[in-house]
Image (tube, rainbow, N blue to C red):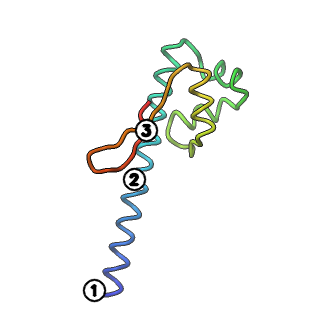
């Protein structure tokens, strides 16, 4: 295989991985937003009790923030939900809230 084909294949795999990661950020953010709204909190109120900026809440809910396990744990604590890892059919682990 030529170097150009190897490079193109690697680039496609990286782009696919990045798209997968972004889609999960959005999925997790949407779920957190739904739970927050169901609990009756505004972004400002939740930011206040979590001691973070409202813009951080917004970025997480919109999939524009690299959500750490610490933030996910904070959301879980303050919004009273549990998250777990679930193995999918293709043997990739995903977060399920």
Say above or below: 24 vs 54: below
Q: In terms of sequence position, does the residue under pointer 3 or pointer 1 come before the other? A: 1
Q: In terms of sequence position, does the residue under pointer 2 or pointer 1 come before the other? A: 1
Circle number at residue 19: 2
**Secondary structure under the numbered disc 3 in the rendered image:** strand
Residue 15 lies in what quarter of the image? bottom left
Residue 76 lies in what quarter of the image? top right
Nearer the observer, 35 or 82: 82
**Secondary structure under the numbered disc 1 in the rendered image:** loop
The percent position of residue 62, horizontal first and vertical second, equals 50, 36
**Secondary structure under the numbered disc 2 in the rendered image:** helix
Write the residue at 69% across / 25% down: 50
Circle number at residue 1: 1
Nearer the observer, 2 or 69: 69
Residue hosting label 3? 85
Of circles 2 and 3, the one toward us is: 3
The percent position of residue 27, horizontal first and vertical second, equals 42, 36
Q: CA distance from mark 2 to mark 3?
A: 20 Å
Of circles 3 and 1, the one toward us is: 3
Q: CA distance from mark 3 to mark 1?
A: 38 Å
Write the residue at 44% across / 28% down: 31
């Amino acid at each position: 295989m030529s170097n150009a084909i190897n490079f193109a294949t690697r680039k496609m795999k990286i782009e696919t991985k990045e798209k997968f990661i972004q889609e999960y950020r959005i999925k997790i953010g949407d779920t957190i937003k739904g739970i927050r709204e169901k609990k009756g909190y505004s972004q400002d109120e939740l930011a206040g009790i979590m001691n973070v900026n409202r813009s951080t809440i917004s970025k997480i809910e919109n999939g524009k923030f690299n959500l750490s396990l610490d933030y996910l744990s904070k959301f879980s604590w303050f919004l009273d939900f549990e998250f777990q890892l679930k193995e999918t059919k293709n043997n990739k682990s995903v977060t399920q809230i």
